Image (cartoon, rainbow, N blue to C red):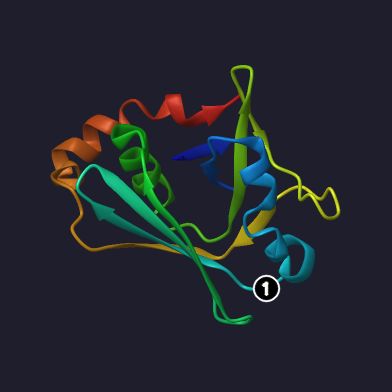
Amino acid sequence: MKLVVKLPKDKPPFIGIVFDHESDAEKVNQNLITDHKYADYRIVFEFISDWVNVKLISNSIPAVKFYNKLSYDKEKLIAWFYITKNMKGFNFSQLYVYGNKECVAKTIAKQKLFVLKVDSYEVHTGEPDDFEPANVIRATNNKNRLYEP
C-alpha cells in the first residue's frame, strides 16, 4: 500500500491510501462511510525508516484506524506538508489502481464513495532529515507536480 497526497483544483487538499487490491479498498473500514461519514476526523503521520504509518482518528466515535508501512514519495509529501501546513479541511480516501489510474473505492455494502472530511493532520515521531528547510524549499519549487488538472 502507499500514501498519496494531491492538491486538486477547486477542492480541499487530498490524502489517499492506495490499496494493492480493489476488494481490500472496498472492504477495509467501510463502516466509517456507512455509519460515521460525518464524524470529526484527524490524521497522524508517523515516520518509521523508509515508511510512513497513518492513523485516521475520530474522537467523536471514538475510533482509530491504522494504515501501516506505507510507501510514499518523500519530495511530494514534503512539498504538500509545506503548502498545507496552515490549512484546515482535507479529503481522505481509500483508493485502488485500475489500469494506470487511481480510483476512489466504493463500499461493498452500499456502494458509497470512500471519502471522509478530515479537519487536520499532525506529523509525529522521527521526521526524516528530508524535512530540513533546504529540502522543503527544493521540494516546493517542484510543487506544480502536486496539482491535479
Q: Residue at x 55, y 46 (%)?
A: 13
Q: The disc labelled 1 sits on which kind of residue? A: Ala
Q: Residue at x 26, y 53 (%)?
A: 47
Q: Residue at x 47, y 38 (%)?
A: 4
Q: Could you tell me residue 29's position as x and y percent?
A: 63, 60
Q: Is residue 49 above or below residue 117?
A: above
| Residue reaching furthest to the right | 110
Q: Is residue 8 above or below residue 126?
A: above
Disc 1 target residue: 39
Horizontal side of 55 relative to 140 (left or right) equals right
Q: How many marks?
A: 1
Badge 1 element:
loop
Residue 11 in sight here:
no
The quarter of the picture where the C terminus appears is top right
Q: Could you tell me residue 103's position as x and y percent?
A: 67, 32
Residue 114 in sight here:
yes
Front residue (pair 117, 20): 20
Front residue (pair 125, 27): 27
